[in-house]
Amino acid sequence: MKPPHMGDIGGRFRRFRSRLGGSAEPEADDVWKAIQLARHAERPYPLDYIARLMPDFEELHGDRLQGDDHAIVAGIGRYHGRPTVVIGQQKGRDAEERVFRNFAMSGPGGYRKAMRVMELAEKLRAPVVTLIDTPGAFAGAQAEINGQGGAIAQSMQTMMRLRVPSIAVIVGEGSSGGALALGVADRVVMLENSTYSVISPEGASAILWRDAGKAQLAAAAFKPTAANCYRWGVADAVVPEPEGGAHTDHDEAARLLDGYLSRTLRNLIAIPDADRVRQRRDRFRRLGAYRELPTGGTAIVVGVDDPRPAPGS
Amino acid sequence: MKPPHMGDIGGRFRRFRSRLGGSAEPEADDVWKAIQLARHAERPYPLDYIARLMPDFEELHGDRLQGDDHAIVAGIGRYHGRPTVVIGQQKGRDAEERVFRNFAMSGPGGYRKAMRVMELAEKLRAPVVTLIDTPGAFAGAQAEINGQGGAIAQSMQTMMRLRVPSIAVIVGEGSSGGALALGVADRVVMLENSTYSVISPEGASAILWRDAGKAQLAAAAFKPTAANCYRWGVADAVVPEPEGGAHTDHDEAARLLDGYLSRTLRNLIAIPDADRVRQRRDRFRRLGAYRELPTGGTAIVVGVDDPRPAPGS
Amino acid sequence: MARRQIHVSIDRLRGQRDEPAPRPQKLPSDDRACPTCASTFRAEEMRHNLNVCAACGYHWPVGGRERVAQLSDDGAYDELWTELRAADPLRFVDIQPYPRRVEAAEAKGTTEALVCADARIGGRPCVIAVMDFSFLGGSMGSVVGEKFARACERAADRGVPLVTVSASGGARMQEGVLALMQMAKTIVGFEVLRDAGVPVIVVLAHPTTGGVWASFASVGDVTYAEPGALIAFSGPRVIEQTTREKLPEDFGRAESQLSNGHVDAVVDRRELSGRIGRLLGILEQPPPATASLAMSLAQNGTERAARMAQALPSIPRRLRQRVLGGEPPADGGPR
Amino acid sequence: MARRQIHVSIDRLRGQRDEPAPRPQKLPSDDRACPTCASTFRAEEMRHNLNVCAACGYHWPVGGRERVAQLSDDGAYDELWTELRAADPLRFVDIQPYPRRVEAAEAKGTTEALVCADARIGGRPCVIAVMDFSFLGGSMGSVVGEKFARACERAADRGVPLVTVSASGGARMQEGVLALMQMAKTIVGFEVLRDAGVPVIVVLAHPTTGGVWASFASVGDVTYAEPGALIAFSGPRVIEQTTREKLPEDFGRAESQLSNGHVDAVVDRRELSGRIGRLLGILEQPPPATASLAMSLAQNGTERAARMAQALPSIPRRLRQRVLGGEPPADGGPR
Ligand SMILES: [Zn+2]
Ligand SMILES: [Zn+2]
């Protein structure tokens, strides 16, 4: 069996429309800059957005099983006149808080806390907003014993089944299954300088280049920027940040996010539940890029360069 | 506020109809004999019934959280031509197995295993049969930390919501919330010599008489026999055991249970799901006995002496 | 339905918590000593400080009606279902007959171990159901179960939240297996609230153990606990007897159960009413837009689906075919 | 849809397991030494014993098609969707370009890391989806996700069970975030199976790690694992690097994951086909009685409710009022 010729594939990808004004082929430096901004020490974290978007917010604690994972904050707040559930991955601002939050790398208990709060959303018919910012789920022995894999899968299942509207926002660094566990929403949106990737550049460097020092090279290979994720259909919209990045002005960053969230939630609420669930499934069913070989002839690429709806909800 | 006179209450309870041929006021000795039979070392346990009722049975393991509680066995078997989920509390037959099974006193993981298997039943539209035989849920530090209370409550919630038919069978000793956790079914049925009580006689003796040696007295006070539970509406039917007790003939005991189960499941399956769920709720909503004082006049007793449907499904 | 308008004026001492109360003079008649810090308080002071030690924050038990008054705006509430009283289905006698125990408990003025009421918290109407540990150890018998279920149904019918405070040693043993069944009855109540989308806030007071913790108390939408409250299925003494483990001092206490993941927050009693009022504000449903309401009625909910299915036989046969599938009618065409 | 009829005759050696195979003569060309007990076997022996060491039970990896053949009755199956091949959406280059890696892997005869097929196990038709660790470490990229979703949809459409065997290092990094998305795609597939009430049996082979364990592999209806299989989100090496813990030898292995509650049974490969066949017999739905089917169609399922609601606009206005509620029409009476 002769492997099909793959040389013509690249050409198709060069035809990507550049909807966001950027080049279809961002420079490696730009990618690295986005990664730096996504991880900026002064970048707003979920609780910073929550404080600005919903002054009345009740944080809920505990997975109702065996603990309270501080890497994930979850609760219910009043947002534009209705109860709204928010779940976020919270990095720490200073050294002490970083340890307390485990650098936003949660164990299974964090996802189980998220699921129990999603159940509350379901009961109260409250929309769910997730704020994603994690280098990945925690790699630890106890996390494995307590079912890190199953917790991530079940979190995806829970989000896939929600009959209430949901929006996932990548606010910082969205890495690996630990990010996707909270990312199965009706709309997935990325802040301008956020990143979304299958693995952190450092992890990829160690595994693919067998060299811990190739993170910048890995970043350039993964191109995990918001603009690229939008092109690939992984993000439905890109929300602008203040000039220079979200860290320069938390209030303005929250205001820009608020614009997207409030408008999109309003639109989503108007969709009948069953339709919304079906559309959500269809959204994730479609994602991917592969070739479909006809019985003979040239390959057809299916996936990322399909026509897509305009940005915004 | 003068407390109402309670002397006339006893009279109403003396009017209990004795549907099962026994005296409405069983002798203390009879109660104790039932307790001894319910705990007989040779009494059939869930796996004994399962082996006879469903030769094709797949035991499932684990709560998908952190362990596999051996006090509860759960699985799916072929029963009268359809997949049927069975969950049972399993005492050990010999000293070693008793320790392995923790004397059928499960921790939260046991109930969570039960719940995950109930979810499978729900997906496959398989009926659920529970076989109850426990001195109670385990009293241990780790069980508390892992949410023994919440696990029991959630198990009740899960059973209350099942859209598939369910039957709970008290096959031996049904004590406290640890038993009820698996007892929220469409039909609750007791084997002739089984018992169902809020607490074990030994526990009651220690707490109420402040004397560990008053178990027999406590048993007589609680009267937790099948016949009494039937009268109180707590059991919907009493399934006869072989002459002398189920331990004398496991095959015959299984055959007698099979008769009830197969007929009742057939009847339950014919009821539309929504009706069945409503009826199940109504069943547990009704249980209890209290007085309702009119603005002046004699007390009306509500509850246990209400007219009840005939035994059988 | 017997109701009684009760007005109790409560000075919550909000904002005064930081100033320690002046050391009270010993009054032999009604003073109480704090078991933690040994400060003594007069009954009036105790009541004013919601039965919390002004010096160290120790929480004493609170009676059912007093608790309802503490939670309600201006201490005003309408008590519900005081006509429900314990029966004696087992003619139960331990070291004394059950009716005698009930009589003694009722003689103190409380009718049962659960007090239910209509009230407002933070301006928002709600149904309140509070357990009273002073009535037979707050044990859950048939009256508690019935009142609790009614409270849930009332909250669901009116679309107002349920606020419940637990304080109980567990099931009322003197009612035997019927007491056990009340656990399931409270779960039915919560199912009704769930269908109605009505929130329930559970406050765990000291102690919340046994069948109460193993039923409604552990499955609230939002769960607060009072500082130091023991929250357990099996209490530390029973566990130490069963397993010969030596348990730490804080085992099963509210603060431990928060880190065990079973509680959302430990809330000081003096903050409780304000905190609940704020939470009810968050949870309040927006007024439904007519169009989207109609849409959600048409598209959501199996309840409605079942009703639609029941209505189907009266829908013309041709349409029924279209909806339910199956063979088209032989006499196709407009009816 | 390209399909290929493949017949492979496999002698399962059923019942012969107890007799240890005669010590094989060393044949330098294709013999293999067991890493556990150092017994050596010829390729023919290996194939006959399903790549399990006849002496100690060590399980070697199995290729995708070989595994499908092992599971299928008489080794017969129809492979599905071989026309789906990897694309290179990121034009990804690490130490070599992604297309070069794919070419090399395809050159060995496998088209992708997931082999799907129609087959029968124990006489019962099913859809089989097996990962192939030899194709780029069994990594899950877009082709794996697409084939897996199709396998679920096919099983649901036909009402036959899905049997899937995982063996994967996780997501295919060279497809970047699109590979990550395949995790969610497999979850969509399982949702379709759930709606259809179709069972899915997951077999965890060595290794099942990363995004595969964190998606479909951990949420099967019944989950078997092969002896010694590593099952983990993060592998032991990563954990030791991250936390500097020293992990026990059996960490994350099938046997540990059974006692951790994540696996239903550890099943020897030589038992697997028989065990699955028996399980499919248990799970088979009874033929629906026509009456009760109609009843359940009318009463159950939100799917149907949604369809009914969509059909409503074409139901006469008067009837719609009756079903949906609201004001009766002003011009009441028959239409
Ligand atoms: Zn004090
Ligand atoms: Zn070997």
Image (cartoon, coloured by chain):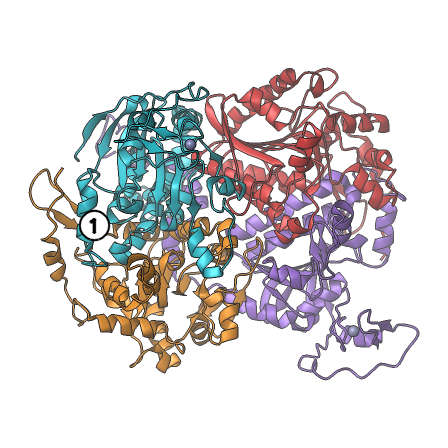
Chain colours: A orange, B red, C purple, D cyan
Q: Number of labelled discs? A: 1
Q: Residue at x 77, y 70 (%)?
A: C51
Chain letter of the residue carrying label 1: D
Asked if residue D220 shows in the view, the reply is: yes
Q: Which residue is mark 1?
A: D101
Q: What residue do we see at 49% from left, 21% from top?
A: B80
Quadrant placement of the N terminus of chain D: top left
Graded by Cα atoms within 10 Å as few (under 14), some (14 to 19) or many (20 or more), the crowding at tag 1 reads: some
Of residue D40 and residue A42, the one placed in the foreground of this image is D40
Q: Could you tell whether A89 is left or right of A220 in the image?
A: right
Label 1 sits on a secondary structure element that is helix
**Residue C114 in picture, x, y percent from top left:** 72, 55
Residue D319 makes an appearance in the image: no
Amino acid type assigned to the residue bearing label 1 in the image: Arg
Q: Is residue D104 left or right of residue A257?
A: left
Does residue B240 sit above or below D304 in this rendering? above
Q: Nearer the viewer, residue C216 or D235?
A: D235
Farthest right residue?
C28
Which x, y percent locates residue C183?
66, 46
Considering only vertical position in the picture, is C325 above or below C294?
A: above
